[in-house]
Amino acid sequence: MAGFVDFEITWRADVFSGAPQESSAAAYGTVGINVRARKPRTEAEWDAALAALSCEIPDRPASP
C-alpha cells in the first residue's frame, strides 16, 4: 500500500559472513537485499495492481 508496482528483489547475499555478529545474524536468517520498485504511471495501472493483490487468510494452516 506504499504505492509501488513491479517490486522485485534484485540481489541477495549473506552480508554478515565473517562478521563478529555472524552467529546472531544466522540465527535469525538475516541477509542483505537490494530491491527495485516503481510508482505506477497511471491511476489505471495502480488500480490493476491493487486488484491483483490477494489478502485472503486461510481458516487453518495447510497440512504438511
Image: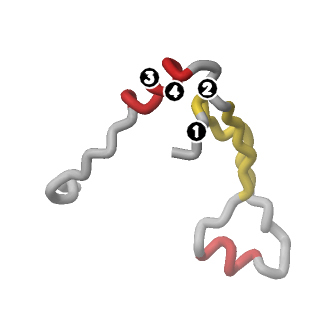
CB-based contact (under 8 Å), mark 2 and mark 3: no
Q: Position of residue 12 (x, y in %)?
A: 71, 48
Residue for badge 1: 3
Specify the amino acid type for callout 4: Trp
CB-based contact (under 8 Å), mark 3 and mark 4: yes
Checking the image for residue 48, the label placed there is 3
Sequence-earlier tag: 1 or 4? 1
Depth order, front residue of 35/11: 35
Specify the amino acid type for callout 2: Pro
Quarter of the picture holding the C terminus: bottom left
Depth order, front residue of 7/45: 45
Q: Secondary structure at mark 2?
A: loop
How far is mark 1 from mark 2, CA to CA? 7 Å
Checking the image for residue 21, the label placed there is none
Q: Position of residue 17 (x, y in %)?
A: 79, 66
Q: Secondary structure at mark 1?
A: loop
Residue for badge 2: 40
CB-based contact (under 8 Å), mark 1 and mark 4: yes
Residue drawn at x 45%, y 26% is 47
Left or right: 44 as drawn, with respect to 61: right
Left or right: 49 as drawn, with respect to 6: left
CB-based contact (under 8 Å), mark 1 and mark 2: yes
